């Protein structure tokens, strides 16, 4: 097993997701502990977590409901990030790399900038470019996005379409949490999402995809990968 060199993190064995989608049960040294899952989607939509080794991060917020948050899951010899909030921070931290040179100037970047009813993941003030970041989790060389219908994702695309109409630029960034994934396929069977995505692309929205990996406990971009629409 890859050794995580941090005294703050602990290992556990995932037992089950609880009815509340943000909570799960994890066995830590023989004790059943309720832990927080920082994901708006149930993990069972992507992977059977039962019996898998997970990496847990202590929650230091006073009066927190749980002692730990699920941070990553062991897959083969490495760990795969499950804390989706970290993905946005990772992209923000690395937005000035050559990977994103197609976006132009990137000196003034702001997280969660609001434009009317729409809140961006990142906003590049230099070029009025909004960036929407979506994460995928798959254990094959190809990942499909989205795996299930998401009203929120469709609503976001409709807002992006409206903003494209009034002169904003947009980029849709797909991030595979598994570094082994080589391609992300936009799911044509989720009609409302696919139609909204295609409409934005027709209006000039760009898109790209990356895989990510954990180095120690810090996520970083691993490789640029193919997107099939």
Image (tube, rainbow, N blue to C red):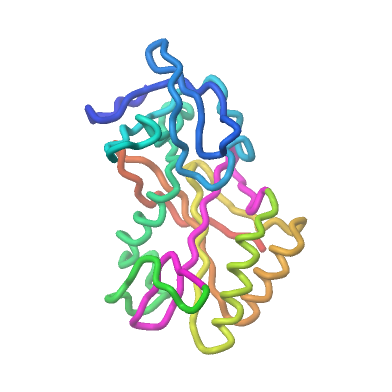
> Between 58 and 139, which is closer to the camera in this rendering?
58
Q: Could you say which quadrant of the image residue 164 lies in? A: bottom right
Quadrant in which the C terminus appears: bottom right
Quadrant containing the N terminus is: top left
Residue sitting at the far top:
30
Q: Which quadrant would residue 202 be assigned to in this image? A: bottom right
Q: Position of residue 117 (x, y in %)?
A: 52, 74
Which residue is drawn at the image coordinates 57% and 23% (left, top)? Answer: 50
Q: Residue at x 34, y 65 (%)?
A: 95
Q: Picture coordinates of residue 125 (x, y %)?
A: 35, 80
Q: Position of residue 42 (x, y in %)?
A: 59, 40
Is residue 221 positioned above or below 53 on the image?
Answer: below
Q: Is residue 167 left or right of residue 30?
A: right
Residue 125 covered by magenta stretch: yes
Q: Would residue 161 appear left or right of 223 to someone viewing this image? A: right
Residue 15 in magenta?
Answer: no
Q: Which residues are magenta?
A: 118-147
From the viewer's perspective, is residue 158 above or below residue 95? below
Q: Is residue 192 left or right of residue 176?
A: right
Could you tell me which residue is drawn at 68 percent across and 76 percent down? 199
Looking at the image, is 199 positioned above or below residue 152? below
């Amino acid at each position: 097993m890859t050794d995580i060199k941090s005294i703050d993190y602990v290992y556990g064995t995932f037992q089950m997701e609880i009815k509340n989608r943000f909570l799960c049960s994890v066995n830590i040294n023989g004790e059943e502990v309720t832990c927080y899952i920082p994901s708006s989607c149930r993990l069972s939509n992507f992977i059977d977590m039962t019996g898998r080794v997970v990496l847990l991060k202590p929650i230091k917020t006073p009066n927190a409901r749980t002692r730990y948050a699920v941070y990553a899951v062991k897959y083969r010899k490495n760990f795969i990030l499950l804390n989706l909030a970290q993905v946005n921070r990772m992209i923000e931290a690395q937005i000035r790399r050559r990977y994103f040179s197609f976006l132009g100037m990137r000196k003034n970047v702001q997280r969660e900038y609001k434009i009317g009813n729409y809140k961006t993941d990142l906003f590049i003030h230099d070029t009025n470019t909004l960036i929407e970041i979506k994460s995928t989790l798959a254990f094959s060389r190809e990942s499909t996005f989205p795996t299930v219908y998401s009203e929120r994702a469709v609503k976001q695309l409709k807002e992006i379409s409206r903003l494209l109409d009034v002169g904003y630029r947009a980029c849709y960034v797909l991030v595979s949490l598994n570094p082994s994934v080589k391609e992300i396929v936009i799911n044509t069977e989720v009609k409302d999402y696919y139609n909204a995505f295609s409409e934005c692309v027709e209006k000039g929205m760009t898109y790209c995809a990356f895989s990510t990996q954990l180095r120690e406990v810090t996520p970083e971009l691993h490789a640029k990968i193919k997107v099939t629409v």
